Image (cartoon, helix red, strand yellow):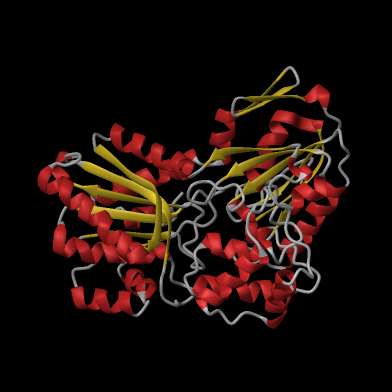
């Protein structure tokens, strides 16, 4: 899975951290998830404990978008075969299918194919009749991959907006508030297009806490945010967005553009959602693997949010407590966590929060843990922000040149620093996206 695994696994602790990351990503892959939570028996479709009698529906239509969408489509074709009458999904990780059209788009910045695919998804959904069943794949990566901008906003505007918001360290939940109010498909508008058909949303969540309206900017979920909220995000972060973006949001704020569909509207009466995988899916699998390798485990949190640098410090402090006082668990130890941290200062396009988390941890190792320690900090989708790497694996040696490490961290130069030390993770597309995963291994190497 990790392309440069052999070069990264230079110590037993590093190898264990990598193994745990790979176990987590494997567990969150659609093949594993759908095998566990999706089955068909005598024309009854069971999704995570809920049964749908397929005799009660007309056509079965499969639509959606995100990092997992191609793999989900392929798996559902295996289960449902030609019962899927038609379908189209947009993804950055296409796989061969027979009945479902797979559109390959770019991620994390949308391209023309994303827009064309999203328009095709809308068209197919709008054609659904009342008795039809619309299976909708909603996953991380769906926000850029399902890009259908409103008429007075261009794709170029969306591309520029995406880069600006991420470079300013705006949290993804806030970014999605803005995206919803610039889209013809997000913020519940896909459900509006499908109504009154039956919509069953298959969710792979990359958002902390699994708010359905935030995953892929909530194409099938009611939206609780407003145009005013979107403007507030831009003003709060003082982002100089394209003029057409700002004008559209201001028109919406003044009631000149219809709001996104809200909770309680009848278009959601026949919509259901199933969260099939999330960050905890990966973290539990990583924990289980660590235990099979003889380590004690502390599943620290699946809800890490905020400044990657500061959260990394707390992470290492917790590991230090375990080593010094055996509280709450004693080494040998795997401290496991996940979530979606951010970089709080403007950054280069090749810098991501996992790199910052890793280098900040490595610097802390010098003060707290020093030896027999390793940390892997990896984006489960394979891309650390806009960087073409998935994150980093570090140990006590990574930050041994303390001043140089500090200078790199403060100058947002983590990519070059970690690259020179051969600590960057080369991963590529993984077929899933359930947030970031952090594995910190602590103890004497001889005890493994």
**Position of residue 241 measured from the top left corner of the image (x, y, whole percent):** 62, 79
Q: Determine which quarter of the picture holds residue 194.
A: top right
**Position of residue 249 measured from the top left corner of the image (x, y, whole percent):** 69, 72
Determine the residue positioned at 51% across, 57% down: 428
Closer-to-camera residue (243/249): 249
Determine the residue positioned at 67% across, 66% down: 227
Residue extending farthest left = 324
Judged left or right of residue 235, residue 410 is left
Residue 299 visible in the snapshot: yes
Judged left or right of residue 272, residue 338 is left
In what quadrant of the picture does the C terminus appear? top left
Determine the residue positioned at 55% across, 79% down: 239
Residue 107 visible in the snapshot: no
**Position of residue 357 measured from the top left corner of the image (x, y, whole percent):** 34, 62
Judged left or right of residue 421, residue 391 is right
Residue extending farthest top = 42
**Position of residue 164 measured from the top left corner of the image (x, y, whole percent):** 56, 76
Closer-to-camera residue (281/50): 50
Q: Determine which quarter of the picture holds residue 55.
A: top right
Q: Determine which quarter of the picture holds residue 290.
A: top left
Picture layout, residue 393 above or below residue 237: above
């Amino acid at each position: 899975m990790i392309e440069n695994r052999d070069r990264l696994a230079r110590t037993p602790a590093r190898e264990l951290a990598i193994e745990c990351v790979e176990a987590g990503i494997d567990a969150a892959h659609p093949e594993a998830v759908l095998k566990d939570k999706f089955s068909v028996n005598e024309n009854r479709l069971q999704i995570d404990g809920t049964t749908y009698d397929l005799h009660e529906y007309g056509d079965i239509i499969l639509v959606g978008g995100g990092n997992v969408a191609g793999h989900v489509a392929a798996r559902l074709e295996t289960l449902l075969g030609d019962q899927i009458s038609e379908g189209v999904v947009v993804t950055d990780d296409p796989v061969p299918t027979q009945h479902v059209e797979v559109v390959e788009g770019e991620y994390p910045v949308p391209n023309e194919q994303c827009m064309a695919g999203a328009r095709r998804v809308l068209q197919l959904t709008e054609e659904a009749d009342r008795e039809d069943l619309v299976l909708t794949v909603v996953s991380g990566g769906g926000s850029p991959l399902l890009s259908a901008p409103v008429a007075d906003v261009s794709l170029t505007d969306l591309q520029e907006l995406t880069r600006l918001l991420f470079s300013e360290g705006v949290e993804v939940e806030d970014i999605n508030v803005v995206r919803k109010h610039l889209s013809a498909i997000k913020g519940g508008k896909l459900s509006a297009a499908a109504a009154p058909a039956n919509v069953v949303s298959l969710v792979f969540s990359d958002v902390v806490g699994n708010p359905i309206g935030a995953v892929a900017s909530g194409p099938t979920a009611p939206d609780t945010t407003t145009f005013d909220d979107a403007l507030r995000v831009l003003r709060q972060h003082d982002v100089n967005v394209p003029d057409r973006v700002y004008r559209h949001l201001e028109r919406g704020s003044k009631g000149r553009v219809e709001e996104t569909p809200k909770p309680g509207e009848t278009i959601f009466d026949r919509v259901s959602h199933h969260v099939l995988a999330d960050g905890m899916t990966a973290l539990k699998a990583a924990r289980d693997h660590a235990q099979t390798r003889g380590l004690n485990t502390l599943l620290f949190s699946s809800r890490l949010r905020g400044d990657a640098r500061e959260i990394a410090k707390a992470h290492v402090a917790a590991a230090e407590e375990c080593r010094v006082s055996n509280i709450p668990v004693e080494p040998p130890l795997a401290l496991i966590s996940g979530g979606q941290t951010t970089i709080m200062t403007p950054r280069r396009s090749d810098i991501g929060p996992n790199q910052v988390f890793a280098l900040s941890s490595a610097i802390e190792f010098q003060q707290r843990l020093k030896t027999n320690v390793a940390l892997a900090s990896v984006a489960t989708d394979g891309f650390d922000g806009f960087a073409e790497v998935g994150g980093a694996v570090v140990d006590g040696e990574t930050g041994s040149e303390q001043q140089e490490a500090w200078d790199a961290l403060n100058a947002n130069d983590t990519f070059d620093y970690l690259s020179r030390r051969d600590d960057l993770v080369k991963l590529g597309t993984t077929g899933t996206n359930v947030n970031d995963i952090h594995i910190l291994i602590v103890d004497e190497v001889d005890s493994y």
